[in-house]
Amino acid sequence: MPIFRIERDGDVAFLVFDTPNAPVNTLSRAAREEFAQVLPTLADDASVTAVVLISGKADNFIAGADIEEFGSLRTAEEAGALSRSGQEFLRWVEEFPKPFVVAIHGSCLGGGCETALCATWRIATDHPKTVIGLPETMLGVLPGAGGSVRLPRLIGLRAALDIILAGKSERAAKALKLGLIDEMVHPAILRQAAAAAARRLVKEGKPSRAPNPPGLVAAILDRTTLGRKLVASMARKQVLKKTQGNYPAQLRAIEVALIGLDQGREAGFAAESKAFGELAVTDVSRKLVGLFFADTAMKKDDPAPGAKAAEVRRLGVIGAGFMGAGIAGTAVTQGWVEARMKDADLKSVGRGIKAATGIVDGRLKRKRITRSEATRLTALVSGTVDYSGFKSCELVIEAVFEDLDVKRKVLRELEQAAGPHTIFATNTSTIPITQIGAEAARPGNVIGMHFFSPVEKMPLLEVIPTDRTSPETIASAVAFGRRMGKKVVVCKDRPGFWVNRILLPYLSEAGRMVGEGTPIDQLDRVMLKVGFPVGPMALMDEVGLVVGQKAAKVMHEAFGARLEPSPLLASMLADQRQGRKNGRGFYHYHEGHKTGVDDSVYDLLGVRPAPRDPKEIEQRCLYAMLNEAAMAYGEGVVKNARDGDLASIFGIGFPPFRGGPLRLMDDLGLANVVQTLEQLAAKHGPRFTPAESLVRMAKEGKSFYPA
Ligand code: T1G
């Protein structure tokens, strides 16, 4: 089956890109080869005055290069050659002898965006699914088919780096404002508008584009060598602050963009393919590409084969606090579902509704939705102080105080108020669901849905069934989580589930080290350098020391001395320190913003801070997490290593370039991990005793991922 077909509209030829048996179009080797045959025929066909490239897919224009092909790249030269072939391929489009219009509907990413950059005219639909961008740095590479050179020339260095360094994609309205596209239309008239544009170009010739962006500042910063040098050095500083130097692609992208602007296109293309080649074979890129495929595969996992998921039209949320309102607001904006919140008094309900509709307003402000959409979404949020309206809820998520008795009472009340099929999902972060559902009248409808804070931003959802949860309830919870735009991992009902299970020993060890006089800021700096987005001490302040103490208590009761919390938390709480919440934690806070370390913590703990060997900080904190991950994996908390690693990355920002804790242990070698743990145990205590399952796997020469 051909990948391209030609449909004529009089003298305009529509080149329809429609890869057979694939949900998206990619610039695969086969597509490039077929394109190379089709294009010359269109060029030579005198009856064709212009060409419009359009996709035959529902929600995708072109998803870029075929990432599968990256796997077979062995050397930087090979990868560089792939980039050069992409550059050559798109030069044909840029130098096509007739107007070449791209009509974009759906995702237009990577090589897809680079193809558009070579067109004479770019039209895109104003549909939410239409996004245009260059996500390559998220794969550890940079745009390698000319995008690193052409985008800065089209929209200016600053705007181009904003997209390339963050791997961003923009909706049509923003793309039009940036000058990334020339025209935005309703999907229904995309073809007509494209044909009309093509005919206008035949008549009027190539459009002359004014320097973009306009204005004096741009003239200095984007269009002078000195200005660009300044922009590049600021961008480098921001990248290093954010990545701690762990992601080389962003730094190379700045370098190449500058060469393309200062030394000309050809020098830019040469630098681009060289950088692409060197980056594509790095371990960082291999890991990030691996995560892309792991993530897309996990999206399709069927948690309960054969079971039918209930379609949730009305969601109930019990507890309109920070988490409850986040769940309601995210469900409404992502799932377009009715959300009814319940809390003890009208004041709390009112606060919850305000917070939930605040999430809708946020999307309106960021132009992610229109005003009329915002009005319709806001109308989906309601509240009550009793269970009125809960009978018709297919799913109710409980987000009340982290206390077993309180949660059991809520379950009892709901089972009386709701329908026989209503699913009761608890958002507990550590308490075993089996304990919460122990007295349930309908245990098959009880499940855990553990969201992360803030709900509208954190991508992960842990779904935790008990042994008595029905397959339909599991299927419904997972489906609803995905509808909320979450990456869903199904975990076994063990205390702390996966993420908190591996996080708490890590935080506890960090606390212990501060209790021994390790400077708070040094400890956090070291773990940022390791690749975590936030240091453990700042994270404890962020999560809240009260919540931390509760979770640590549940884990201590469940796992005994090994997870005995460091006494530090109790001392902090006794001194009325709750973290960022009350502005008193390990750090000072000004209007909620972290300022500097609160040195009075050291007096409170009776220690004098003294710098510690960074290697020891890294090893003690990281190996506390790795060992727990091995233990939880051995207990079957996650069904495979992929889920454990993705949950760690999406849940607590475990450094993606390391692939996750299980992948990291495979890279380190399990025998080496065991040895290091034994050394730590000998020096710091039995809490570092390597997990039995880890020792066994190391002995048997096994790894978490098949070799
Ligand atoms: N290459 C190979 N396979 C791809 C692919 C790609 N670029 N994009 C998607 N797939 C597969 C995916 O694995 C899944 O497969 C199926 O398509 C559906 O995807 C030269 C070097 C486009 C927004 O980074 O972000 O261009 O599991 O489940 O949720 O400079 O896929 O069915 O077998 O994700 O609707 C840059 C990656 C490449 C975009 C659609 N492009 N893709 O999301 O479907 S590098 C990207 C996405 C590049 C140039 C460089 C998303 C999507 P399977 P899906 P979706």
Image (tube, grey):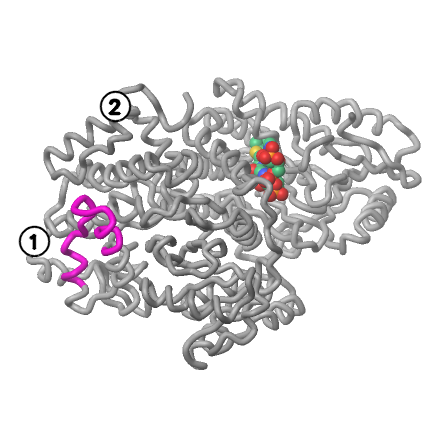
Occupied quadrant, residue 195 = top right
From the image, give the main secondary structure of the stretch colored magenta: helix
Q: Residues within 10 Å of mark 2 (few under 14, many from 20)?
A: many
Query: Considering only order in the chain, which callout, 1 or 2, is on the residue closer to the N terminus?
Result: 1
Residue at 84% x, 25% y is: 41
In the shown orientation, is residue 152 left or right of residue 92?
A: left
Residue at 26% x, 55% y is: 554
Q: Which residue is mark 2?
A: 671
Q: Quadrant of the C terminus?
A: top left
Magenta span of residues: 553-572
Residue at 59% x, 65% y is: 314
Occupied quadrant, residue 216 = bottom right
Residue 434 is inside the magenta segment = no
Mark seen at residue 608: 1
Nearer to us in this view, 54 or 292: 292
* Residue 149 seen: no
Residue 567 is inside the magenta segment = yes
Q: Quadrant of the N terminus?
A: top right
Give the answer, above or below, for where 606 lies relative to 115: below
Nearer to us in this view, 522 or 506: 506
| Residue type indicated by callout 1 | Arg
Find the distance from the CA under tag 2 to the CA under tag 1. 37 Å
Q: Which residue reaches farthest bottom?
A: 346
Nearer to us in this view, 55 or 559: 559
In the shown orientation, is residue 344 left or right of residue 534?
A: right
Ligand 1 neighbours mark 2 (CB distance < 8 Å): no
| Residue type indicated by callout 2 | Ala
